[in-house]
Image: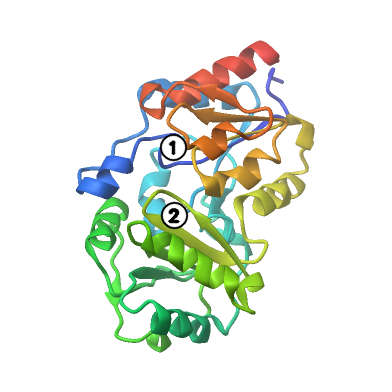
Amino acid sequence: MGKFDGVLIVSDYDNTLIYSERALTHGTELPTVSRENTDAIRYFMEQGGTFCIATGRALPAFAPLASGVPMNGPTILFNGGAIYDFAKGEYLHTAFLPDQVREHMAQLLEVLPGVAFEIYHDNNDMHAINPNELTRNHLHLTHSPTVTLESIFDAPLPIMKLLFEEYQPKLGQIADYIKSQPWGHEYEVFFASNYLLEVTAKGGNKGGMVHRLVEMLGMDPQHLYCIGDHANDIPMLQAARIPFAPANAIEAVHRVEGIRILPDCREHTMAAMIAELDKLY
């Protein structure tokens, strides 16, 4: 028995548990989880708590990093497209994009030719359309082998997630176009950073998967605590008893009801969060 029995923490990874923005924009090496954060997570788990990651990364992009994160619960991947159990080596739940996604993206490419995006599947296959500098930096960040395709129709089904990589204002134009289409309601469209736009199946967001995870683990949502820095994290922050965010979070996250702002993610945010929970329990 421990003071955190029945308590669940779900944490974003990039720019929350580690700082990865510079790796994306400048192609530098990805930092590891700090010793302070690692020690705090281990203490939380030793006291009975369950620690999980919710990331936009695909399985092949997060798998090499998983061993560097102490965790004893399943992982939410693809920004809510799936729940994966690294201990068992299997998916516990998946939410694929509609089969018509290729036709829909072909329409988008007619209106916005040349936009860059990656295509993710539930295995280790990854593909790219019109890769640009941001794509190359992102692939350097994830260390994921990716095959460039000439046509979206060359991508096999099923597809788990799309990731657009562009600067503003083009990134906003992509989001606006998808949302304005008759088929736009079939997708979740949200910004994962200033340069990344995620597209998953309707309901396949971090909030929906956190609810499913709570049910799967048989836990009380009154003991759910989430932390994240960007727009894609807001649905799960809204599901938490107390939402937390690092100081580097975007302004929309700072405005989430009940949010508690912690130090910048480069200053061991997770250790600060667990110290807060230590006082609460």
Q: Earlier in the sequence, mark 2 or mark 1?
A: 2
Residue type indicated by callout 2: Arg
Please state the horizontal and vertical placement of residue 166, each as a whole percent of the image: 33, 61
Tell me where residue 33 sits by quadrant: top left
Question: Is the C-beta separation of discs 2 and 1 under 8 Å?
Answer: no
Question: Left or right: where does residue 35 sit relative to residue 238?
Answer: left
The answer to whether any part of residue 258 appears in the image is yes
| Residue ID for mark 1 | 69
Q: Quadrant of residue 189?
A: bottom right
Q: Which residue is mark 2?
A: 57
Q: Is residue 58 visible?
A: no
Within-10-Å neighbours for mark 1: few <14, some 14–19, many 20+: some
Left or right side of 30 for 180: right
Disc 1 marks which amino acid?
Val
Q: Outermost residue, top direction?
A: 279
Q: Residue at x 52, y 82 (%)?
A: 104
User: Disc 2 or disc 1, which is closer to the eye?
Assistant: 2
Q: Nearer the viewer, residue 200 or 108?
A: 108
Q: Residue at x 41, y 38 (%)?
A: 15
Q: Is residue 263 above or below residue 117?
A: above
The image shows residue 183, relative to residue 262, as above or below, that is below
Q: Kindly identify which numbered label has been placed on residue 201.
A: none
Q: CA distance from mark 2 to mark 1?
A: 14 Å
280 vs 130: above or below: above
Quadrant holding the C terminus:
top right
The residue that appears at 59% across and 72% down in the rendered structure is: 180
